[in-house]
Amino acid sequence: MCRGEGSNTRTVVHLTRGRVYVALSFLVLSLCLCVMFVKFPINTTSVVPQDYREVPILMYHRLTSKKRTRRKYVVTANLFAEDLKYIKNNGYTTVVIQDLIDYVKNKKDLPDKPIVLMFDDGFYNNYLYGFPLLKEHNCKMVISPIVKEVDYYSFYVSDSHAEYAYCTWSQLKEMHDSQLVEVQNHSYDMHETGKRYGIMKKRGESFEKYKQRLTKDFQTAQEKIEREIGVAPTAFIYPFGAVNKESMNILKGLGCEVFANCEERINKIKRGDPECLYSLKRFFRSYKKSSEDYFKIKIEGKRKQKLNLFGEN
Ligand SMILES: [Zn+2]
């Protein structure tokens, strides 16, 4: 055996021991890290802040107690009840316009699956059938009355026909005071389809005349709602969903923060971006589909399409 062989063997032994130490140290370190992650898991949702929410808005008009009187703008109270059950059983939370404003402008949060239920025109059947259901299911809605009709049914006639009557101020106030109902502006008396379609500009009408007419109508509705309910509306719900750029500029100048139309899409409500509130889209609620089908096809189907569009899943 020569000298060189012994020293080579020692070197090999040292090297092997060194590798064992490195491997053992690595194993101990890995075990420590595993224990740390099990004890203090990383919360990915808090690491990546979500700065927007997908918010579907459903648009209803009249409610009826009878299946035979349902039609285009009339759904049964039973169907509305089914919608509320679906909403609750599928993780949605009903919110109102003020919640959207607070999320965008006031750093408040929204629930995971917010949804807005809107009733246009202010029919008495919303109070008669819809309000008790909201209380039963602890859900919220936005009601946007034609203010002239509310005045008429409050001060000039005493008629509470379930098919065609409108709410009175005391009914709207009662709903508002429950904190389940928010009242918004749907015009004073520009909800018509004559020479003018909703609040659109008439053919040949000067901009100044149009501005005067719209300003007067909007402010009359704002003042009456504030006087009777106690809170001024923050949103304008376009009659018939008829929108033009001039009206939006005029109403923005009068302090209106939110505008809703009848385009059928999911809203992307972005934190710190007031412009996303200028064109809230709404899904028309037809009587023809069950709650399950309506949500699966119209709401959740659109949500999926939109998410794919953004390359998300
Ligand atoms: Zn309307």
Image: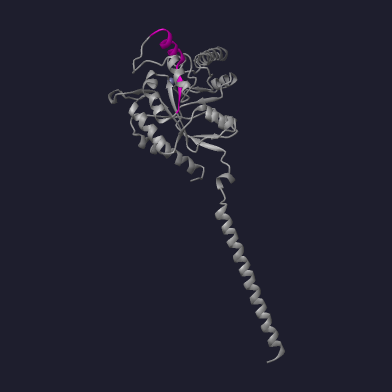
Q: Can you give x and y, in whole percent of width and height, for residue 31 in the image?
A: 58, 62
Q: Quadrant of ligand 1?
A: top left
Residue at the extreme bottom: 1
Q: Is residue 39 above or below residue 27?
A: above
Would residue 267 be counted in the magenta stretch?
A: no
Residue 307 in view in this figure: yes
Q: Quadrant of residue 172?
A: top left
Is residue 51 or residue 209 the one in the foreground?
51
The tally of labels here is 0
The residue positioned 39% from the left and 28% from the top of the image is: 136
Apparent side of residue 209 relative to residue 282 in the rendered image (left or right): right
Residue at the extreme top: 156
Residue 298 in view in this figure: no
Q: Is residue 114 above or below residue 167?
A: below
Q: Can you give x and y, in whole percent of width and height, for residue 44 in the image?
A: 56, 48
Is residue 234 or residue 266 the one in the foreground?
234
Quarter of the image with the N terminus in it: bottom right
Is residue 304 or residue 11 the one in the foreground?
11
Q: Can you give x and y, in whole percent of width and height, for residue 266 in the image?
A: 47, 34
The residue positioned 36% from the left and 11% from the top of the image is: 159
Q: Quadrant of residue 87?
A: top left
Would residue 152 be counted in the magenta stretch?
A: yes
Residue at the extreme left: 68
Range drawn in magenta: 140-157
The residue positioned 59% from the left and 66% from the top of the image is: 27
Q: Can you give x and y, in whole percent of width and height, for residue 125 in the image?
A: 37, 20
Which color scheme does this rendered protein use?
one colour
